[in-house]
Structure formats: structure tokens, C-alpha cells
Image (cartoon, rainbow, N blue to C red):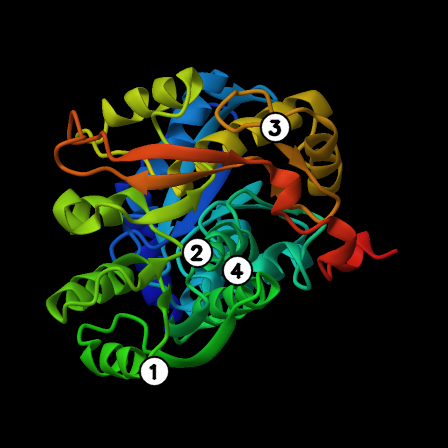
Amino acid sequence: MPHTTWTRRLAVAGLLATCLAAPAGAQTPFRIGVIDDLSGMYSGNGGPNMVLAAQLAAEEFGGKVLGRPIEVTGVDHQNKPDIGSGLARQLVDQRGVSALVLGGASSVGLAVQSYAKDRKITTLVTGGYASPFSGPNCSPYGTQWVPSTGELANAVAASVVQAGGKSWYFITADYVFGHGLAADAGKAVKAAGGKVLGEIRHPLGATDLSSQLIQAQASGADVIGLANAGPDLVNTIKQAREFGITSKVVAMLVFTNNTVALGLDVAQGIRMAVNFYWDANDASRSFAKRLMARNGNVVPTMGHAATYVSTLHYLRAVEKAGTDDAAIVNKVMKETPISDGIYRNPRIQANGRVVMDMYLVEVKSPKESKSKADLYRIVETIPGETLFTPAEKSGCPLAAG
């Protein structure tokens, strides 16, 4: 994409983003950039509400840090790594951002984190679920705040195998996240005593998944595992219902907006692992109500919560460190307890992975639900140490040895 087009996109996204702007003549703002899918297939998982969550954190922090007014700017990477990398360069070179919040397709986030690592810029991964963020592609200046494919697979696949779903066939989104989720789920299935019969892939943004579903059904597998997300996941589940395939289908990453899109009549009974549900505790309810009061009552996702928590923790670390130097700030972030109360037992490992307890939740039936936002019941709480890969086993060079 030409440089002028990137410039125009940055300017437009900056106008759309919610900012805490500095008055004329004031000190240069302390800038945080949100690089996400603001208008495409993953915009419901993160998108404008991710920008809003970062702004909410900045406002509640007090609107200033290091004596400078905080400014949050969102840009739209369109789920394309080259566009995301170009926008990151502009945010760093032209806007002077101190931190980048990364969401949308993991392929974009990994490209941006690599660039930010070279430039020694802090990255907060709040919408990237691929394991390399805190594995082989980790950054000394990066932290990953949402569960990766390994945790999602381990939390769901093992319990399904134990319940009788011994043989699996995967329908996989053909990009880094889908590949990782299918691979990790396959490992979890085998470790639990099951087996994988096969896999079929589909392009990102597929609308017709009939051939994939027919092939998966013909495999004779006990379980059809969905290694996809967002609209791809929604389309797969809806079309599976049309084919009469219901009890066989298992999803491993379902966002609240996906559940809303499916409707409780279709989604009821689906179980998935999450690190955040808005109605889990007093802190999560308080955050959700503040965000929903400003976004038309849209229920926050894991990505929205991660953006709020990570931005607030980052700003506290900057204030404590007295600088925005990425190396110093990230050291302080790892040493400082995450104290907002939204996550259960959170801590940051040496590889930048944020470990916390997770919930196994089940979608309620229409009769059980008491409101449009009343989507899940919590089945069990899973201790983080039983799910997350220890830093020294993650493949991250920072934690080697």
C-alpha cells in the first residue's frame, strides 16, 4: 500500500479513535497506539471497543502520566501484516507512541511485535491468541494478556475426550492462529488418550463451509473440532446446524459477540474456556458496566478486558518507573502485582506471558438467560498453573535455561 494511503488511514483512524487530547501549547502527549481490526471480521472481538477500553483505562488512571496528558489513537490494520507494520512505523516515527496495543489477526500482531522489538517499543498483546507472541517470537518489551491456542485447547479438548469424544477431525482456518489451535488441540487430544483422524482447512473469511463440514462428517469422528474464530466460527456452527450436525461440534475460542451473533437458541450448551467473563466477579461487573454505558450496551470480550487491564498496569508501571523506557517499564510490570481484580491470580512470566486462572463456561439456554447480557454459566475455575506453559518451556529465548 502506498505511503500516502497509510498516512490517510492513520489520520482517519485517529479521528475515529477516542483520545485524551492535550490543549494547544501543552506538553507533548504521552501516546498509546492501538493497532487492531477496526472495521473487518474481527472488529467485534476487539475493534473500536478495544480503543475505548484503552481510553477508559487512561481516564481512570487520571488522564496524565509523567506530567503529560495521555492520548490513545486507534488505527485499522485490515488484518494485513504489511499494513499493520506500516501503521506501526508511522505511530512510532510520526506520533512518538510509547506503547502499542495489538489486536486482530495474530499474523499482523506478530509482524508488529517484531518491528516494535527492534525499535524497543512496549507491546501489549490483547487480541493475539497465537502462542509465538510469548514463545519463539517473544519480545523483552512485550506481554501477552489473552490465552494462547495451547491454553484454549488444553482447557476444552481434554474434558471432551474424557467425556467420550475420543476421535477428532478438525476444521481449521488457514493462517497462523488456526494452524496453532489445531496443532495444540491435537496434542491435547492425544495426551488425554484420544486420536486425530484428519483436518481440512478453509480460507480466512470463508462464507461457504459445506464441503469442509461434509468431509468432517464423513470421517466418522466422534468430534468435529473448530480451529477457527470470529465470523468463520459463527458461519461454521450455523451451517453445521443446517446439516444436522450438532452434538459433534466443539469450539475452542468463542467470543461473547460470537455467542450474541449465533443466538442462545443455536449456541446453547457450547462450552469454551475464557480468561474473562463480565459477570464473574464484582471487579469484572464494574468494568463491564462502565464500558457498556459508553458503547451501546455491547458486552465486553476477553480482548476488551485485556486491553483495559494491560493499559492500566502499563501506566502504573510507567509512573512507578518514572520513565517510558521499554526495558525499565517491562521489568517493573513483571515485578508489580496486577491489582485491578478482574483476573484471578494473575502474574507475568519471564517470557511476557500473563498467567491467570481461567473459566470453563457453558452458554445458557434462552430459558435460563435473564437478560441479553446473561450469556454464560461458569462450570468450573481452572488454575492457571495447570494450563499455561512455563516460561522455560515456551521456546522464548528470554527464558532459556
Judging from the image, what secondary structure is the residue with disc 1 in?
loop
Residue drawn at point x = 44 percent, y = 49 percent: 127
What amino acid type is highlighted by mark number 1? Ser
Label located before the other in sequence (3 or 2): 2
Give the farthest residue toward the right. Answer: 401
- The answer to whether residue 199 is visible is yes
- Give the residue pinned by disc 3: 345
Q: Position of residue 324 (x, y in %)?
A: 66, 34
- Give the residue pinned by disc 1: 219
- Give the residue pinned by disc 4: 130
Judge whether 350 appears above or below 176 on screen.
above
Dot 3 and dot 1 residues touching (CB under 8 Å): no
Dot 1 and dot 4 residues touching (CB under 8 Å): no
Judge whether 172 appears above or below 98 on screen.
below
- Does 320 sit left or right of 206 as displayed? right
What amino acid type is highlighted by mark number 4? Ala
Camera-side residue: 300 or 15? 300
What amino acid type is highlighted by mark number 2? Val
Q: Position of residue 260 (x, y in %)?
A: 19, 44
Dot 2 and dot 1 residues touching (CB under 8 Å): no
| Mark 4 or mark 2, whichever is nearer to me | 2
- Give the residue pinned by disc 2: 160
